[in-house]
Amino acid sequence: MKFNAVLRAQSKDPHLVSQCNEICRGNKYATSIHATNSCVLKLSKLTVACKVYRGIKVRERPAAAPGGSPPRVGRARLATLSDRRVTSLTATPDLRTL
């Protein structure tokens, strides 16, 4: 939250600058942000960009919400994989088309 406040304050928006000053009390977290950026850059070289597919496995189905609105997903597990076939195997059957 504090890192986001520092980065958003760089836009010079008065509200975001005052929010950053209130939350961070003058600390710009320069070393932490630099280290995080360095890690992201180094780790990004270990993988290749590719399509990923998401499969959702619903553990329990909630009842329909009052007023006729569709039910929300209760407890679920989300899988993100590069192999579409494996993702569709882990998905709940009626959610495979999402």
Image: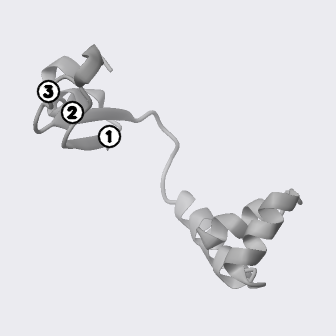
What is the CA distance from the residue labelled 2 to the residue labelled 3? 29 Å
- In this picture, residue 57 sits left or right of residue 25: left
Does the CB distance between marks 1 and 2 fall below 8 Å? yes
- Of the numbered discs 2 and 3, the one sitting upstream in the chain is 3
Residue drawn at (62%, 63%), measured in percent from left and top?
41
Residue type highlighted by circle 1: Leu
Instruction: Identify residue for label 1.
Output: 81
Residue type highlighted by circle 3: Ala
Label drawn at residue 4: none
* Residue 60 rendering spot, x and y as whole percentages: 10, 36
Label drawn at residue 63: 3
The residue nearer to you, when weighing 17 against 29, is 17
Figure check: 11 above or below 96: below
Figure check: 9 above or below 69: below
Instruction: Identify residue for label 2.
Output: 86
**Which quadrant of the structure image shows residue 82?**
top left
- In this picture, residue 72 sits left or right of residue 6: left
Q: Residues within 10 Å of mark 2 (few under 14, many from 20)?
A: some
- Of the numbered discs 1 and 2, the one sitting upstream in the chain is 1
